[in-house]
């Protein structure tokens, strides 16, 4: 990509953002809270798109912009941490994952417990850094949190809320079980590779 492509590409992305923000402001005229929420969700979604395209600098910029608009928006924090991890910026990823709010708001007064996500991702970052002890500690904590959440009736409510808003479905429950299985395997491998 040449210098002009970079300059015009950035201008195009900024123009796209401004146009989308104007559209959202017209759509939700007079409701600044909804406008702000829609902007944050759109930036996070666009950032995730760029992250999937391995355009991590643009993804990081969008996640940071989302967090400026709403410093408590958990999906932007998690995605920003993942983007830093993908770039090999492990210290930055750890800093972000440690800032993730432990609970986030869904619809109304409902909250979603994010401790599993936090522990899981911190474990993976420490594994990437070669710190097996901390990786095992965080991954084991993610399993404990998962067990605690499953035993807690709040998790059932949370699962139902996520299904209603289209964030969590039957397939994701299966994916969660697969994730738990994978975590156990990773811990086993880390412990075996730590043995003398």
Image (spheres, rainbow, N blue to C red):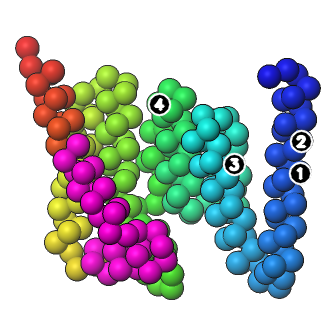
Instruction: Quote the CA–CA distance across marks 4 and 1.
Output: 31 Å
| CA distance for labels 2 and 4 | 29 Å
Q: Nearer the viewer, mark 4 or mark 1?
A: 1
Which quadrant is the C terminus positioned in? top left
Number of the label disc, if any, that sits on residue 90:
4
Secondary element type, mark 4: helix
Q: Main secondary structure of the magenta part?
A: helix
**Quadrant showing the N terminus:** top right
Q: Is residue 49 magenta?
A: no
Q: Are marks 3 and 4 in contact (CB under 8 Å)?
A: no
Report the residue marked by disc 1: 15
Q: Position of residue 102 (x, y in %)?
A: 40, 61
| Residue picked out by circle 2 | 11
The magenta region covers 155-183
Specify which label sits upstream in the sequence, 3 or 4. 3
| Label 3: which secondary element | helix
| Foreground: disc 2 or disc 4 | 2
User: Label 3, on which residue?
Assistant: 62
Between 177 and 147, which is closer to the camera in this rendering? 177
């Amino acid at each position: 990509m040449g210098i002009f492509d970079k300059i015009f590409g950035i201008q195009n992305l900024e123009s796209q953002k401004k146009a989308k923000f104007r559209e959202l402001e017209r759509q939700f005229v007079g409701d600044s809270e909804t406008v702000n929420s829609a902007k944050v969700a759109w930036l996070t979604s666009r950032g995730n798109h760029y992250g999937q395209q391995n355009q991590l600098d643009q993804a990081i910029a969008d996640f940071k912009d989302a967090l400026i608009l709403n410093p408590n928006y958990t999906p932007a924090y998690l995605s920003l941490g993942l983007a830093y991890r993908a770039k090999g910026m492990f210290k930055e990823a750890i800093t972000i994952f440690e800032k993730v709010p432990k609970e986030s708001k869904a619809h109304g007064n409902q909250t979603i417990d994010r401790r599993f996500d936090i522990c899981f991702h911190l474990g993976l970052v420490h594994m990437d850094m070669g710190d097996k002890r901390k990786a095992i500690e965080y991954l084991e904590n993610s399993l404990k949190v998962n067990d605690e959440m499953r035993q807690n009736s709040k998790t059932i409510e949370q699962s139902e809320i996520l299904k209603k808003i289209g964030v969590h479905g039957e397939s994701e429950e299966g994916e969660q079980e697969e994730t738990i299985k994978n975590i156990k395997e990773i811990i086993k491998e880390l412990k075996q590779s730590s043995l003398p």
